[in-house]
Image (spheres, rainbow, N blue to C red):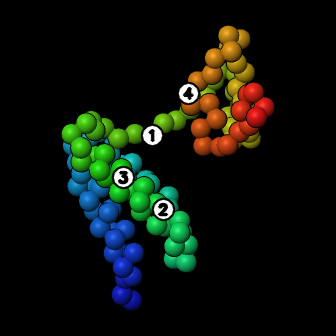
Amino acid sequence: MSRLSRLQRQVLSLYRELLRAGRGKPGAEARVRAEFRQHACLPRSDVLRIEYLYRRGRRQLQLLRSGHAMAMGAFVRPRGPTEDPRSAGTGTTPPEDGDGTRSPLDGVGSPETPRDGR
């Protein structure tokens, strides 16, 4: 096996540290494993993306190590009763309640034009 690069060693070290910090916190170990598996297929040449994910992982590690973290999870936007699961991710937004309010999670993850058109 070839020697690991410095960045690869750092990523593996971060993985171990996140697993250790997540012990005893509900959902933390599973979330760490899932996140790393999701990005395991990144090519070695995509250094900018790997470094970005590494920095993001470091910030999550700091949060886990702080005494304030009780569990680790993900924010997932629940499907509404009228939303078709096959149309999820197509860019359509669920209908509003009529009072003009929106959920704080509406539009998270994708840039949209603000409602005022600016």
How dense is the environment of label 4, judged by Cα within 10 Å: few (below 14), some, or many (20 and up)? few
Q: Amino acid at mark 4?
A: Pro
Amino acid marked by disc 2: Tyr
Mark 3 burial class by Cα count in 10 Å: few <14, some 14-19, many 20+: few
Calculate the distance from the C-alpha at mark 2 to the C-alpha at mark 1. Answer: 19 Å
Res. 87 visible in picture: no
Asked which quadrant contains residue 89, the reply is top right
Judged from the image, the secondary structure of the residue bearing numbered disc 2 is helix
Secondary structure under the numbered disc 4 in the rendered image: loop
> Which residue is label 4 attached to?
104
- Residue identified by numbered label 3: 59
Q: CA distance from mark 4 to mark 1?
A: 15 Å
Give percent across and percent down for residue 103.
58, 24
Circle 3: residue type: Arg
Q: Which residue in the protein does label 1 denote?
A: 74
Q: Which residue is mark 2?
A: 52
Locate the C terminus by quadrant: top right
Element class at badge 1: loop
For the residue pair 85 and 25, the one nearer the viewer reads as 25
Tell me if residue 60 comes above or below residue 46 in the rendering: above
Q: Pick whichever of labels 1 and 3 is earlier in the sequence.
A: 3
The CA span between labels 1 and 3 is: 15 Å
